[in-house]
Amino acid sequence: MRKSILEFIQKAAVKKEKLLAILLDPDKTSLDKLPEITSRIENLKANFIFVGGSFVENGITDLFVKTLKKHTKLPVVLFPGDFSQLTNHADALLFLSLLSGRNPEYLIEQQIKSVPFLKNSSLEIIPTGYILIDGGTNSSVLKMSNTKPILQENSSLAVDTAVAGMYKGKQLIYLEAGSGAKNPVNSELISAVKKHISIPLIVGGGIKTKEQLNSAYANGADLVVVGTAFENNASFNF
């Protein structure tokens, strides 16, 4: 029987065991390089591989994850930019609601579009509150969602948004500075959000160094996601 990924994250958070996920974008990752890439990920002792992107063509994610699973036993978690990026070859799905924006397409419409697939799916579905934080770049998520991020200095809004997500029944909160962000989510904002929620906190976007990773952990991130830094540097290591 497959172990619950959400329960694993929840138990690790209680024990203060810090987790790491590497994000792979099927649009930017060649299938023939997956053996090498999965080996690098396992050498980093990552706990999960997240898969997703803002502009992935229909059908690509299914083939990508199917191939990926041939080369790793790490749990594969979908982090989709669109409902078309769903596949039963993965282990779990972050069922995202873009709480920082006011675009109904990413608050509820994409979720409704995914239901016909999910009703017959074997995926573990994890309700996740997704909050975009200004990372100093016009990220692909901002372009796609047509929403504005929360400013780094507006920690009170980030806190209230995260707490609202928790009250709405989200099981995880994900603070995201955006793919290729110049600046990761700052330590003060991470700490402020962590103090006011009782569910695990994911932090991603713009984390390029071990110091930034450790700062995110020290200020309350239970799970850190690294994508662009791993993608752009074949010798990337913490």
Image (cartoon, rainbow, N blue to C red):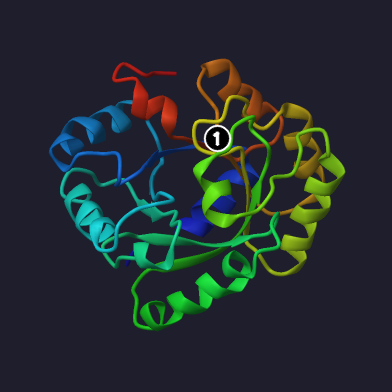
Locate residue 38 relative to residue 108 in the image: left or right: left
Q: For this rendering, which residue is in front, 17 or 20?
A: 20
Q: What's the residue at 25%, 36% (across, down)?
A: 38
Q: Give the residue type at disc 1.
A: Gly
Depicted 23 relative to depicted 53: above or below: above
Q: For this rendering, which residue is in front, 182 or 197?
A: 182
**Secondary structure at numbered mark 1:** loop
Q: Is residue 55 visible?
A: yes
Q: For this rendering, which residue is in front, 26 or 195?
A: 26
Locate residue 230 relative to residue 185 in the image: left or right: left
Q: Position of residue 232 (x, y in %)?
A: 35, 24
In the picture as drawn, the residue positioned furthest to the left comes out as: 32
Q: Position of residue 153 (x, y in %)?
A: 82, 33
Q: Position of residue 128 (x, y in %)?
A: 59, 60
In the picture as drawn, the residue positioned furthest to the right comes out as: 156
**Count of marks placed on residues:** 1
Q: Classify residue 25 by image quadrant.
A: top left
Depicted 218 relative to depicted 25: above or below: above
Q: What's the residue at 81%, 43% (across, down)?
A: 195
Q: Which residue is mark 1?
A: 205
Q: What's the residue at 24%, 32% (across, down)?
A: 37
Q: For this rendering, which residue is in front, 193 or 178?
A: 178
Q: What's the residue at 57%, 50% (across, down)?
A: 11
